[in-house]
Image (tube, grey):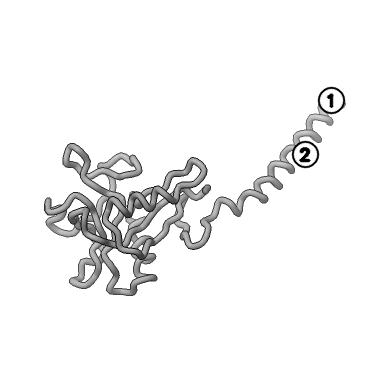
Amino acid sequence: MASSFSVITCSILVALLQSHFLIVSPCMSCISPWTSFGNHCYLLVTDAKTFVEAEQYCQSLSRLGKPSYLASILSQEEHDFLVLLIKSVYGESGMKTWFGYRKDESGSFAWLDGTPSGGYTNWYAAQPSGDGDCAEFLDTTDDFNFLWNDMPCYERRRSVCKIATRF
Protein backbone atom coordinates (compact mmCIF):
# COMPACT_ATOMS: atom_id res chain seq x y z
CA MET A 1 0.00 0.00 0.00
CA ALA A 2 2.82 2.41 0.87
CA SER A 3 4.49 1.67 -2.47
CA SER A 4 1.25 2.49 -4.33
CA PHE A 5 0.95 5.75 -2.40
CA SER A 6 4.55 6.73 -3.33
CA VAL A 7 3.90 6.09 -7.03
CA ILE A 8 0.72 8.20 -6.97
CA THR A 9 2.44 11.00 -5.03
CA CYS A 10 5.35 10.95 -7.45
CA SER A 11 2.98 11.03 -10.46
CA ILE A 12 1.10 14.00 -9.02
CA LEU A 13 4.38 15.80 -8.32
CA VAL A 14 5.59 15.19 -11.88
CA ALA A 15 2.25 16.44 -13.29
CA LEU A 16 2.45 19.59 -11.15
CA LEU A 17 6.02 20.26 -12.21
CA GLN A 18 5.11 19.73 -15.86
CA SER A 19 2.14 22.07 -15.64
CA HIS A 20 4.26 24.65 -13.79
CA PHE A 21 6.92 24.39 -16.49
CA LEU A 22 4.30 25.00 -19.16
CA ILE A 23 3.13 28.06 -17.28
CA VAL A 24 6.60 29.57 -16.93
CA SER A 25 8.07 28.47 -20.26
CA PRO A 26 6.84 31.57 -22.15
CA CYS A 27 8.96 33.64 -19.74
CA MET A 28 12.03 31.91 -21.18
CA SER A 29 11.60 33.57 -24.57
CA CYS A 30 12.60 37.11 -25.39
CA ILE A 31 10.28 40.04 -24.86
CA SER A 32 9.80 42.29 -27.88
CA PRO A 33 11.80 44.17 -29.16
CA TRP A 34 14.52 41.71 -28.02
CA THR A 35 15.40 38.87 -30.43
CA SER A 36 16.25 35.34 -29.35
CA PHE A 37 19.30 33.32 -30.31
CA GLY A 38 20.52 30.34 -28.29
CA ASN A 39 20.21 31.06 -24.57
CA HIS A 40 20.29 34.84 -24.96
CA CYS A 41 18.23 37.79 -26.12
CA TYR A 42 19.68 40.59 -28.24
CA LEU A 43 18.60 44.18 -28.73
CA LEU A 44 19.82 46.35 -31.57
CA VAL A 45 20.03 49.93 -30.28
CA THR A 46 19.59 52.35 -33.18
CA ASP A 47 20.56 55.54 -31.31
CA ALA A 48 24.23 56.35 -31.91
CA LYS A 49 26.21 56.45 -28.65
CA THR A 50 29.83 56.37 -27.54
CA PHE A 51 31.03 52.94 -26.41
CA VAL A 52 30.70 53.89 -22.72
CA GLU A 53 27.20 55.35 -23.23
CA ALA A 54 26.17 52.21 -25.15
CA GLU A 55 27.41 49.94 -22.35
CA GLN A 56 25.65 52.05 -19.70
CA TYR A 57 22.44 51.83 -21.71
CA CYS A 58 22.73 48.05 -22.04
CA GLN A 59 23.35 47.73 -18.29
CA SER A 60 20.26 49.85 -17.58
CA LEU A 61 18.23 47.06 -19.26
CA SER A 62 19.29 44.41 -16.71
CA ARG A 63 16.41 42.50 -15.10
CA LEU A 64 15.97 40.43 -11.93
CA GLY A 65 19.61 39.60 -11.39
CA LYS A 66 20.21 39.03 -15.11
CA PRO A 67 22.78 41.57 -16.25
CA SER A 68 22.68 43.04 -19.74
CA TYR A 69 25.88 44.13 -21.50
CA LEU A 70 27.06 45.08 -24.92
CA ALA A 71 27.04 41.71 -26.68
CA SER A 72 29.86 39.21 -26.38
CA ILE A 73 30.29 37.14 -29.54
CA LEU A 74 31.49 33.64 -28.76
CA SER A 75 31.03 31.71 -32.01
CA GLN A 76 30.74 32.07 -35.76
CA GLU A 77 27.04 31.18 -35.44
CA GLU A 78 26.43 34.00 -32.96
CA HIS A 79 28.40 36.39 -35.19
CA ASP A 80 26.34 35.37 -38.25
CA PHE A 81 23.10 35.83 -36.28
CA LEU A 82 24.11 39.36 -35.25
CA VAL A 83 25.08 40.25 -38.82
CA LEU A 84 21.62 39.14 -40.01
CA LEU A 85 19.99 41.15 -37.21
CA ILE A 86 21.95 44.28 -38.18
CA LYS A 87 21.22 43.80 -41.88
CA SER A 88 17.51 43.32 -41.15
CA VAL A 89 17.43 46.86 -39.78
CA TYR A 90 20.02 48.70 -41.86
CA GLY A 91 20.06 46.69 -45.10
CA GLU A 92 22.99 45.17 -46.94
CA SER A 93 25.21 48.23 -46.52
CA GLY A 94 24.88 47.83 -42.77
CA MET A 95 26.00 50.25 -40.12
CA LYS A 96 29.01 50.34 -37.84
CA THR A 97 27.88 48.79 -34.55
CA TRP A 98 29.47 48.51 -31.10
CA PHE A 99 29.59 45.17 -29.30
CA GLY A 100 31.14 44.34 -25.93
CA TYR A 101 34.85 43.87 -26.67
CA ARG A 102 37.30 46.43 -25.31
CA LYS A 103 40.93 46.73 -24.23
CA ASP A 104 41.41 46.21 -20.51
CA GLU A 105 44.07 47.70 -18.21
CA SER A 106 46.71 45.33 -19.59
CA GLY A 107 46.04 46.46 -23.18
CA SER A 108 44.42 43.17 -24.22
CA PHE A 109 40.89 42.92 -25.55
CA ALA A 110 38.37 41.49 -23.07
CA TRP A 111 34.61 40.88 -23.01
CA LEU A 112 32.65 43.32 -20.84
CA ASP A 113 30.41 40.53 -19.51
CA GLY A 114 33.43 38.74 -18.02
CA THR A 115 33.51 35.89 -20.56
CA PRO A 116 37.12 34.66 -20.73
CA SER A 117 38.97 35.96 -23.79
CA GLY A 118 41.09 33.78 -26.00
CA GLY A 119 38.27 32.09 -27.86
CA TYR A 120 36.43 33.21 -30.97
CA THR A 121 37.39 36.45 -32.77
CA ASN A 122 36.61 37.74 -36.26
CA TRP A 123 38.96 40.67 -36.90
CA TYR A 124 39.35 42.25 -40.32
CA ALA A 125 42.82 41.80 -41.88
CA ALA A 126 45.49 43.79 -39.97
CA GLN A 127 43.09 44.39 -37.06
CA PRO A 128 43.25 45.26 -34.31
CA SER A 129 45.54 47.96 -35.62
CA GLY A 130 45.94 49.78 -32.32
CA ASP A 131 44.08 52.94 -33.36
CA GLY A 132 41.24 52.29 -30.91
CA ASP A 133 40.38 50.55 -27.66
CA CYS A 134 36.84 49.41 -28.55
CA ALA A 135 35.54 46.90 -31.11
CA GLU A 136 32.92 47.51 -33.76
CA PHE A 137 31.41 45.63 -36.69
CA LEU A 138 32.63 47.15 -39.94
CA ASP A 139 29.83 47.57 -42.45
CA THR A 140 30.00 46.19 -45.98
CA THR A 141 30.64 49.54 -47.70
CA ASP A 142 34.16 48.44 -48.68
CA ASP A 143 33.39 44.71 -48.62
CA PHE A 144 34.42 44.35 -44.96
CA ASN A 145 31.54 41.90 -44.48
CA PHE A 146 30.94 42.86 -40.85
CA LEU A 147 34.35 41.81 -39.62
CA TRP A 148 35.73 43.45 -36.48
CA ASN A 149 37.67 46.69 -36.25
CA ASP A 150 39.22 48.54 -33.32
CA MET A 151 37.97 52.10 -33.06
CA PRO A 152 38.33 55.00 -30.60
CA CYS A 153 35.64 54.59 -27.94
CA TYR A 154 34.45 58.21 -28.25
CA GLU A 155 33.05 57.58 -31.74
CA ARG A 156 29.27 57.36 -31.92
CA ARG A 157 27.84 54.05 -33.16
CA ARG A 158 24.73 51.94 -32.98
CA SER A 159 25.09 49.01 -30.59
CA VAL A 160 23.82 45.57 -29.70
CA CYS A 161 22.95 44.45 -26.16
CA LYS A 162 22.78 40.87 -24.83
CA ILE A 163 20.99 39.32 -21.84
CA ALA A 164 20.27 35.75 -20.71
CA THR A 165 16.88 34.46 -21.94
CA ARG A 166 15.31 34.16 -18.50
CA PHE A 167 14.57 37.82 -17.80
Label placed on residue 48: none
Q: Quadrant of the N terminus?
A: top right
Query: Which residue is most to the right?
Result: 1
Report the residue at 50% width, 50% height from top. 165
**Which of disc 2 and disc 1 is earlier in sequence?**
1
Write down the residue under mark 2: 12
The percent coordinates of residue 92 (x first, y second) are 31, 74
* Dot 2 alpha-carbon crowd within 10 angstroms: few under 14, some 14 to 19, many 20 or more: few
Report the residue at 30% width, 54% height from top. 99
**Amino acid type for the residue under numbered disc 2:** Ile
Could you say which quadrant of the image residue 8 lies in? top right
* Dot 1 alpha-carbon crowd within 10 angstroms: few under 14, some 14 to 19, many 20 or more: few
Report the residue at 38% width, 70% height from top. 89
Report the residue at 31% width, 53% height from top. 53
The percent coordinates of residue 110 (x first, y second) are 26, 43
Residue in the foreground of this view, choosing between 14 and 84: 84
Query: In the drawing, does residue 20 fall left or right of residue 1?
Result: left
Asked if disc 1 and disc 2 are in contact, CB closer than 8 Å, the reply is no
Q: Secondary structure at mark 2?
A: helix
Query: In the drawing, does residue 142 fall left or right of residue 22?
Result: left
In this view, the mark in front (1 or 2): 2
The percent coordinates of residue 16 (x first, y second) are 73, 42
What whole-number distance in Å separates the C-alpha atoms at marks 1 and 2?
15 Å
Q: Is residue 73 visible?
A: no
Label placed on residue 2: 1
Q: Secondary structure at mark 1?
A: helix
The percent coordinates of residue 11 (x first, y second) are 76, 38
> 106 above or below 32?
above
